[in-house]
């Protein structure tokens, strides 16, 4: 089951680690996020917080993907099948976030 | 308050320069609304400030301030903290 969850994550370009998290805890981890319970906990808190964000009283969740962008790396977070997938990717862009 | 004047100036320039930006919100560290326009308002202040604070705890480096981006088919909400002020921008796909 773990392989089915993670083989897609392994092939994401520039990925340097990943986590698969359910309500019961971490199902899989790898690379820089291997056994990283702290990051898993914070990301789950952020997912719960972000799901409370509602625009125009919309019923559906406010995001398909949540990105947390630091200077050298990015956490890309998405939810699928009652599980939270987190991928840590190298951030090679040096220009500021274009708003 | 000088902080609020800066917020209003920022909101004005952001809205004028970028037509796809439909909402802007500035909050303090407690989530209190310092200024907002468009689709973002008081009700979003708490979530925005908490999200930024949680994101900051992902790193030990206090100078590496993260940008949180909530991405959907219709647009993005970007959140970032600068000093004591947290700024959120709602940008739609045009």
Image: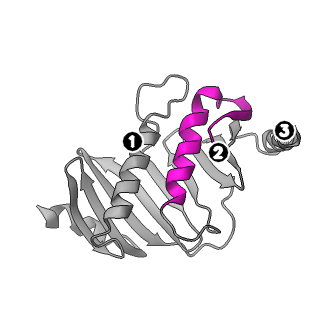
For discs 1 and 3, the disc positioned in front in the rendered view: 1
Between the residue at mark 1 and the residue at mark 2, the CA separation in whole angstroms equals: 19 Å
Residue B15: which quarter of the image? top right
Task: Name the residue at 40% across, 54% down.
Answer: A43
Image coords of residue B47 (percent x, y): 53, 38
The front one of A53 and B70 is A53
Instruction: List the residue tagged with mark 2.
Output: B29
Instruction: List the residue tagged with mark 1.
Output: A48
> Horizontal placement of A24 versus B46: left or right?
left
Image coords of residue A58 (percent x, y): 47, 25
Q: Secondary structure at mark 3?
A: helix
Q: Chain of mark 3?
A: B
Instruction: List the residue tagged with mark 3.
Output: B12
Asked if badge 2 and badge 3 are on a common chain, one would say: yes
Residue B7: which quarter of the image? top right
Between the residue at mark 1 and the residue at mark 3, the CA separation in whole angstroms equals: 31 Å
Q: Residues within 10 Å of mark 3 (few under 14, many from 20)?
A: some
Number of callouts in the render?
A: 3
The front one of A81 and A50 is A50
Between the residue at mark 2 and the residue at mark 3, the CA separation in whole angstroms equals: 22 Å
Residue A79 falls inside the magenta stretch: no
Asked if badge 1 and badge 2 are on a common chain, one would say: no
Image coords of residue A53 (percent x, y): 49, 34
Q: Secondary structure at mark 2?
A: loop
Task: Name the residue at 67% across, 47% down.
Answer: B86
- Magenta stretch in the rendered image: B30-57
Q: Is residue A61 above or below residue B3?
A: above
Q: Is residue A46 above or below residue A3?
A: above
């Amino acid at each position: 089951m773990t392989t089915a969850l993670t083989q897609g994550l392994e092939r994401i370009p520039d990925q340097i680690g990943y986590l698969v998290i359910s309500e019961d805890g971490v199902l899989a981890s790898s690379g820089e996020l291997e056994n990283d319970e702290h990051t898993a906990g914070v990301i789950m808190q952020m997912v719960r917080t972000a799901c409370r964000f509602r625009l125009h009283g919309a019923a559906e969740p406010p995001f398909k993907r949540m990105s947390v962008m630091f200077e050298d790396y990015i956490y890309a977070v998405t939810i699928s099948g009652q599980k939270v997938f987190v991928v840590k990717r190298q951030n090679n862009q040096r220009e500021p976030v274009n708003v | 308050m000088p902080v609020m004047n800066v917020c209003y100036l920022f909101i004005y320039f952001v809205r004028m320069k970028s037509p796809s930006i439909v909402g802007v919100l500035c909050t303090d560290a407690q989530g209190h609304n310092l200024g907002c326009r468009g689709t973002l308002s008081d009700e979003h202040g708490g979530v925005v400030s908490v999200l930024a604070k949680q994101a900051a705890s992902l790193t030990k480096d206090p100078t590496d301030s993260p940008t949180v981006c909530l991405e959907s088919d219709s647009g993005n909400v970007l959140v970032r903290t600068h000093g004591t002020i947290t700024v959120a921008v709602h940008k739609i796909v045009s």
